[in-house]
């Protein structure tokens, strides 16, 4: 795969070609995933659950994020690398800049933060300083306690309207990409149509410009944990290696056979 950049990813949206995204937290998976043509790798703070065994992303520190970003960056074969600003590391503009710098110096090409309108001044500042930004709306796991659990968001008209308004605001502030997590497909479709930047969905139906999953989830490595939006690509008997499962994921995202009806919220 040729080296992916902001420009090549934006081009995929313009050409209507779905963007394949997976999380990665270590050097071995980084090599495997990027070799299979996954255009974007995300060092997600979901590492708090899948790497560290926590119940949420709240305990993850910026040092954890920088460490895992360095591991992934060393063996990346050309994917655009996004790294999450972890819990409470972007409450002020100054804090946001300092912590985003740590992730960029660790090898990230873009930082991701959870939230809408209230983040716009920080997004503007990051972009002015040359740091590409991915925003994250819908179910924002760092606010799990405020949301009352890991629940689908935007199910009523008022909350759907708020998410749409937030999406337009973060794009206007300069964000280059938007993750939409656990929102009804109709809302994801409306947002994707109205934005010029790529939308990447997880539990948002097959209408977004790209799809993301946690790599352990799509390999069925998380035991009984199986949210509705996850597909285990190892369940297909023809798949007999991690490489083949990841290649199948890329193919299924590209031909829009994943996510199917059974993986979405209406
Ligand atoms: O932390 C993460 O892995 C994420 C994805 C689920 C989008 O934010």
Image: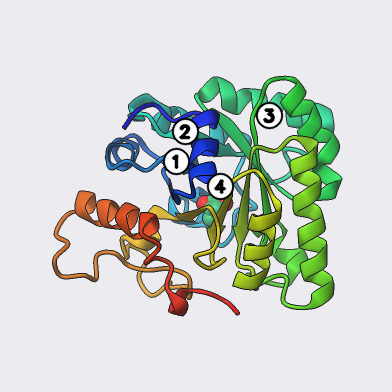
Residue drawn at (44%, 41%) of the image: 41
Q: Earlier in the sequence, mark 2 or mark 3?
A: 2
Labels 4 & 2 near each other (Cβ < 8 A): no
Q: Is residue 225 above or below residue 4?
A: below
Q: Can I make out residue 196 in this image?
A: yes
Residue 193: image location, x then y, percent: 65, 57
Per the image, label 4 sits on a secondary structure element best described as loop
Task: Give the residue number, with chain letter if any, for mark 3.
Answer: 99
Residue drawn at (33%, 29%) of the image: 77
Disc 2 residue lies near ligand 1 with CB under 8 A: no
Residue 261: image location, x then y, percent: 46, 78
Q: Is residue 74 above or below residue 152?
A: above
Residue drawn at (29%, 52%) of the image: 246
Residue lying farthest to the front in this orientation: 15
Per the image, label 1 sits on a secondary structure element best described as strand
Per the image, label 3 sits on a secondary structure element best described as helix
Task: Give the residue number, with chain letter if any, for mark 4.
Answer: 45
Residue 13: image location, x then y, percent: 53, 45
Mark 2: few, some, or many residues within 10 Å (few <14, many ≥20)? Answer: many
Instruction: Mark 1 vs mark 4: give the one in front.
Output: 1
How far is disc 1 from disc 4 in space, using C-alphas? 13 Å
How far is disc 4 from disc 3 in space, using C-alphas? 14 Å
Task: Give the residue number, with chain letter if any, for mark 2.
Answer: 80
Q: Which mark is residue 201?
A: none
Q: Can I make out residue 46 in this image?
A: no
How far is disc 1 from disc 2 in space, using C-alphas? 6 Å
Residue 32 found in image quarter: top left
């Amino acid at each position: 795969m040729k080296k992916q950049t902001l420009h090549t990813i934006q081009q995929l949206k313009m050409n209507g070609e779905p963007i394949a995204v997976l999380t990665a937290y270590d050097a071995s998976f980084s090599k495997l995933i990027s070799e299979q043509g996954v255009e974007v790798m995300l060092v997600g703070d979901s590492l708090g659950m899948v790497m560290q065994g926590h119940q949420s992303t709240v305990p993850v520190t910026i040092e954890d994020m920088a460490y895992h970003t360095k591991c992934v960056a060393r063996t990346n074969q050309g994917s655009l690398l996004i790294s999450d600003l972890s819990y409470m590391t972007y409450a002020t503009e100054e804090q946001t800049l300092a912590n985003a710098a740590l992730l960029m110096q660790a090898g990230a090409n873009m930082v991701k933060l959870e939230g809408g309108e209230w983040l716009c001044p920080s997004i503007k500042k990051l972009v002015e300083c040359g740091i590409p930004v991915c925003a994250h709306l819908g179910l924002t796991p760092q606010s799990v306690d405020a949301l009352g659990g890991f629940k689908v968001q935007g199910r009523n008209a008022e909350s759907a309207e708020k998410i749409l308004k937030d999406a337009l605001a973060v794009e206007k502030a300069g964000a280059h990409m938007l993750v939409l997590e656990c929102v009804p497909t109709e809302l994801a479709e409306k947002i994707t149509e109205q934005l010029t930047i790529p939308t990447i969905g997880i539990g948002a139906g097959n209408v977004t410009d790209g799809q993301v999953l946690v790599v352990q989830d799509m390999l069925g490595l998380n035991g009984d944990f199986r949210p509705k939006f996850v597909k285990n690509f190892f369940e297909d008997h023809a798949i007999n290696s991690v490489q083949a499962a990841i290649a199948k994921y890329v193919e299924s995202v590209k031909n829009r056979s994943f996510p199917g009806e059974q993986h979405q919220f209406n």
